[in-house]
Amino acid sequence: EQVVSDLLVDPTTRGTNDVVHKVTAVGSRSVAKAQKFIDDFVNGDKTVKAYGTYDEVYADKNVDAIYIGTPHTYHYTNALDALKAKKHVLCEKPVTCNAAELRSLIATAKENGVFFMEALWTRFQPLAKEVKELIDSGTLGLPVVVHADFSVDFGIEKLPLTHRMLDPKLGGGAILDLGPYPLIWTILALYEHPANKRTKPSNVTGTMYKTPITGVDCNTSYIVTFSPNSSTGSTLAAQAVLSCSMNVASHNPGVTIRFEKGTIMIDAPVPCPLRYTVQYFQEGKPGEIAREDTRTFEYVGSGWHFQADEVARCVRDGKLESELWSHDKSILEMEVFDEVRRQGGYKFPDGIEKVLL
Ligand SMILES: NC(=O)C1=CN([C@@H]2O[C@H](COP(=O)(O)OP(=O)(O)OC[C@H]3O[C@@H](n4cnc5c(N)ncnc54)[C@H](OP(=O)(O)O)[C@@H]3O)[C@@H](O)[C@H]2O)C=CC1
Ligand SMILES: O=C1OC[C@@H](O)[C@H](O)[C@H]1O
């Protein structure tokens, strides 16, 4: 609902003059539900087709790209079907249940010559792009520690057991749903850092508190360490201390990136922040603040349209993956989650993972 509402926002309001979006068809397991969605979220546009199966959307010749917004454990099958039908795909986060499923989707996308991207919308926020430039400029020196949390109080005691946050068959729990956001800031600040040379973390540790309601993770903490590596040429030594919870609200700052010469603090909500502050340390006096700058952002819509612009540009330019949120970053994310789930003892019920290692 939110993604489609954003697709209808005039792109020029965000300075996008080279691409536009058109909702062509809506697929649901019920045609009446698809039509209601069009009535409610596409202004009842009569040119938009309502389909009672997802396969009919994949078969529609007028559809160029598919956005997949089903629960996590359906992403693999839905994306696979769309890619095999040679449609470009933007698939919600977490892109799959595990890294093996993701590798299989990437291979299928390549075989079929179509674009594929996880809908990690945070990476395309104007604030994220600006923070990335500041980090890479080296003004603050090297990053040393990232602290990031994303939490939402879902009121889990009152949710039905079949809710996607609680049901293990739908990949319920905090790590897969909320965990991508602390990690995306880590990937932006550390994995993508020029000094890291795209080197994978040297260590990942995680611990979970699982709710007795259904046994999925309610609170998860995870630490991701990057170490210098002579075989890749990485000189970065940095650590990210991350957490996510589904029974408490977020707090500020949602993300803190601590550098040799200063600190970046990013306000919640960390998926789509609109304000950050930079503290610059005094020359030769780490920790003593010489200057502080706060930057604020605003745009029309809720922020999901920036990733849609990226998809449109990549498809227009014949690219099979985005440079900003490339396949290797999603693979890293899913590998971290696999490891955190392994250490936390969170196993999906049999048959949920369609591809295993
Ligand atoms: N980027 C972001 O900020 C956000 C991303 N998400 C992601 O989007 C995905 C969907 O989340 P959300 O919209 O809250 O999920 P919902 O539980 O609301 O499900 C979305 C739709 O998926 C379809 N669906 C297909 N199979 C099933 C099934 N077995 N059980 C339930 N629904 C099914 C249903 O559509 P139908 O009946 O019409 O076929 C349903 O309306 C998740 O992966 C989540 O991580 C969610 C919220 C925010
Ligand atoms: O991506 C998300 O961000 C907001 C949360 O409320 C939601 O559960 C999650 O999927």
Image: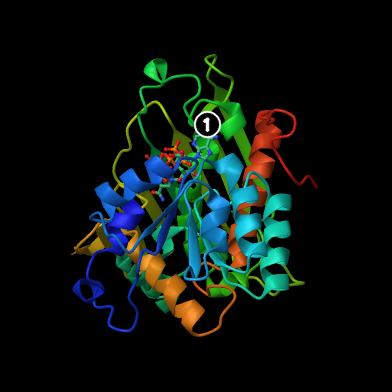
Horizontal side, residue 57 vs residue 288: left or right = right
Circle 1 is placed at which residue position?
173
Q: In front: 87, or 304?
A: 87
Give the class, few, some or many, for how many residues have Cα within 10 Å of label 1's Cα (few <14, many ≥20).
many
**Total marks in image:** 1
Please, is residue 243 above or below residue 327 in the view?
above
Q: Give the residue at the far right of this rendering.
A: 357
As drawn, is 85 to the left or to the right of 23?
right
- Residue 226 seen in the current view: no
Secondary structure beneath disc 1? loop
The answer to which of 150 and 234 lies nearer the viewer is 150
Residue located 49% across and 31% down the image: 164
Q: Residue at x 63, y 64 (%)?
A: 85
Q: What x and y, as percent, mark residue 265?
A: 31, 54
Residue at x-position 55% and y-position 26%: 167
Q: Amino acid at mark 1?
A: Gly
Quadrant for residue 127, please give it.
bottom left
Along the viewing direction, whichever of 220 and 92 lies nearer the viewer: 92
Q: Quadrant of residue 33?
A: top left
User: In the image, is 18 to the left or to the right of 71?
Assistant: left
Q: Is mark 1 within 8 Å of ligand 2?
A: no
Q: Position of residue 337 (x, y in %)?
A: 62, 44
Residue 141, image quadrant: bottom left
Q: Is residue 131 left or right of residue 78?
A: left
Residue 236: percent from left, percent from top: 59, 66
